[in-house]
Image: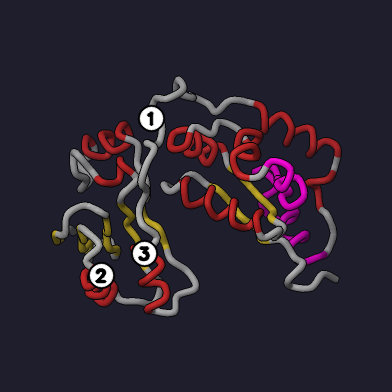
Amino acid sequence: MSTAAERPIVMAVTGASGAPYAVRLLETLIEREQRVSLIVSDHGLRLLDTELDIGSVAALRDRVGGAKWDKAVRVFDDRDRGAAPRRQAAGLGRGRADHPDARRRRDARGSRPVPGRQARGQGRRPRGEVLTPLAISRPARRFSADRIEIVSGYRSPKYNLMLRKKGHQVARQSQHTEGHAVDFRIPGVPTQTLLGYVRSLRLGGVGFYPHSRFVHSDTGRVRFWKGS
């Protein structure tokens, strides 16, 4: 049986906002030669395409690892999200991902375009600065957190406008559309407590959303507001 250090990490890209964080995590794992069992749903592919112009699993491979990807990453079909990755992570066998039919499905998945894909450059994540890691890494260290829940990271201008039209509390010129903001919470840490610490960092704007239980942090001018 595999030791814990030899077992792969199961990573899933499901479609929630924050594609840059998923890609950076995958890059880091591959650089450290950590084996990864990767699952990317259709919504996950659409998110990668919208935020980072990555329209397929093959394009994701080229972006984050190339040859190193081939040594570290095993891609599982989204329909195999249960038993197969779990068995591999537990060192109990390879599961259905290695079956010839599964490989053919995976190869087809890697080359097919994302449904409703936009023209290149439209809805693409802007180049330049992204949210400073201090906004989430410092609170993680301060509260000894092994997990942070990202409520919202980068949002394309089109998606931001859609949220406004639906009545959500989002700014017209949101820092999220520049990749300069993150909404997050830390399980087990009261939102008010997290808010106090994030405000003390004075990294930029801070929003408090007690009902939704998250804190907003961005790299704009220092300011504060309270949402619902």
Front position among marks 1 and 3:
3
Residue 213 falls left or right of residue 187: left
| Residue 80 drawn above or below residue 32 | above
User: Which quadrant, please, contains the C terminus?
Assistant: bottom left
Question: For the stretch drawn in magenta, what is the main secondary structure?
Answer: helix
The spot of residue 48 in percent (x, y) is: 50, 38
Q: Say which label, 2 or 3, has the lower sequence index.
A: 3
Numbered range of the magenta stretch = 66-91
User: Which quadrant, please, contains the N terminus?
Assistant: bottom right
Q: Residue at x 22, y 35 (%)?
A: 165
What is the number of the mark on residue 108?
none
Q: Residue furthest top?
A: 119
* Total labels drawn: 3
Question: Relative to the observer, which residue lies in front, 165 or 224?
Answer: 224
What is the number of the mark on residue 201?
2
Amino acid type assigned to the residue bearing label 1 in the image? Gly
What is the number of the mark on residue 134?
3
| Residue 2 drawn above or below residue 35 | below
The spot of residue 54 in percent (x, y) is: 54, 34
Q: Are marks 2 and 3 in contact (CB under 8 Å)?
A: yes
Question: Relative to the observer, which residue lies in front, 66 or 173?
Answer: 66
**In the image, residue 62 lies in the stretch drawn in magenta:** no
| Residue 226 drawn above or below residue 61 | below
Display coloring: secondary structure
